[in-house]
DNA sequence: CACCAAACTTACTTACTGGTAAGTATAGCA
DNA sequence: TGCTATACTTACCAGTAAGTAAGTTTGGTG
């Protein structure tokens, strides 16, 4: 037994990977425990029900998002690193086999989710949309990027595009995601 | 027993709905059989393995796509009904609870799919992309629609956007899909 | 009427699912 | 040294998954 248990953290790491590679119903507690070399019940010790694991995962995502964007949301700054960071992150995750973003994973298995998980997911999505909406709004004002229509729908559109492309890339090849990101860039007039 | 067995057809109908509402690993043979009032083994009689069901579903989608687009692919014509048809279809499917398009469903459960199903899926995606690419190319030539960049990446981008938005709409509400379709329209300069 | 094949049902198997109850090892503390 | 909370393991449970083997019903055909 480790002095400070890192098993919980390892469970979260593995669960996050499994969630994004196989979807929420696509992995079992055994998939986690066997990979860590512990028993099934050890995972249940930290997360009694699978929905507890879901809530913890979503909570983590929200924290990471807030941490990474807090400074921008508070004080502004250049928007290009924000947008390019989103593209790079999506691309890297996909190449690491994590082709299903949490939105997609939980959307597919939505009918099996308890109400609290659904609500947390909606909140996380809200925060993500708000962040990108503000990035687009500020970016347009600062003339760093251009686009058609209002920032809100454009933000939705970009997030949806990346989510869909990430999934399609698994079936059709990773070039697809590069092409789509290129298309988004050109429509934001930030061709490199 | 019906003279001409329509059980197979009913199985396909139900399976298609379940695939698009819960994903491929999200439904079981029991979900199909109980709904039709037959036994589990009856489904296995028509589709021995679940991958046979997957292949049949994909084959059906390909046929439907080809049937609906054959005329346009052969002789051209106005492109607006093609594009608007895609939007209307996506919107309707989502409202009927089928928030997961086949690409998304099979992408999430990709790791469990046998090689032949993966290849059929890739082929179906290819045909879909080719169709929309041609629609965009012809539409631009005929000055029915405008867009940034090449038709290929734009087609990918639109399909990815619709797939992602359809999934996100389930979590965030159906308005999201309307907003996204509105955004796509305005970027094609076909605002109504 | 006899037969045959299609379309099932009955009854089963093996494997895995999330989940639980009870026992055990260990680290730190009074 | 003994106690206690943490972090597990062992050993199970009921439910469900896909899949199968063998028997049964039925419509159509010779």
Image: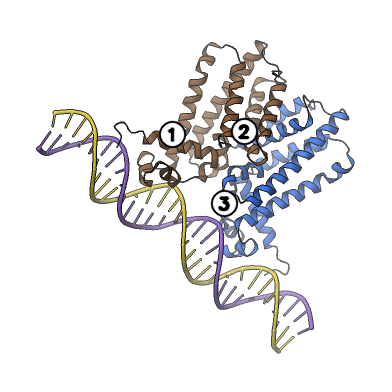
Chain colours: A brown, B blue, C yellow, D purple
Dot 2 alpha-carbon crowd within 10 angstroms: few under 14, some 14 to 19, many 20 or more: many
Q: Which residue is mark 2?
A: A163
Secondary structure found at label 2 = helix
**In the image, residue B133 above or below residue D18:** above
Q: Residue at x 79, y 47 (%)?
A: B66
Q: Is residue A80 left or right of residue B185?
A: left
Q: Residue at x 68, y 34 (%)?
A: A176
The image quadrant of residue D25 is bottom right
Q: Which residue is mark 1?
A: A56
Secondary structure found at label 1 = helix
Q: Position of residue A4 (x, y in %)?
A: 31, 31
**In the image, residue A13 above or below residue B112:** above
Q: Which residue is mark 3?
A: B27
Q: Residue at x 62, y 44 (%)?
A: B105
Q: Are marks 2 and 1 in contact (CB under 8 Å)?
A: no
Q: Residue at x 70, y 30 (%)?
A: A179
Say yes or no: labels 3 and 1 on the same chain. Answer: no
Q: Is residue B165 left or right of residue B68?
A: left
Inter-mark Cα distance, 2 to 3 = 23 Å
């Amino acid at each position: 037994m480790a002095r400070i248990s890192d098993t919980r953290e390892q469970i979260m790491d593995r669960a996050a990977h499994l969630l994004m590679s196989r979807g929420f119903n696509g992995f079992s507690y055994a998939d986690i425990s066997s990979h860590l070399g512990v028993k099934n019940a050890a995972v249940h010790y930290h997360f009694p029900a699978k929905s507890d694991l879901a809530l913890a995962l979503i909570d983590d995502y929200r924290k990471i998002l807030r941490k990474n964007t807090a400074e921008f949301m508070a004080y502004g700054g250049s928007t290009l690193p924000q947008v390019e960071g989103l593209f790079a992150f999506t691309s890297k995750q996909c190449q690491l086999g994590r082709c299903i973003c949490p939105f997609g994973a939980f959307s597919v298995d939505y009918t099996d989710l308890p109400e609290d998980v659904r609500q947390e997911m909606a909140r996380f999505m809200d925060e993500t949309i708000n962040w990108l909406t503000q990035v687009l709004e500020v970016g347009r004002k600062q003339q760093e990027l251009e686009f058609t229509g209002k920032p809100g729908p454009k933000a939705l559109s970009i997030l949806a595009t990346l989510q869909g492309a990430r999934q399609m890339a698994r079936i059709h090849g990773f070039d697809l995601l590069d092409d789509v990101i290129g298309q988004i860039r050109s429509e934001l007039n930030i061709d490199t």
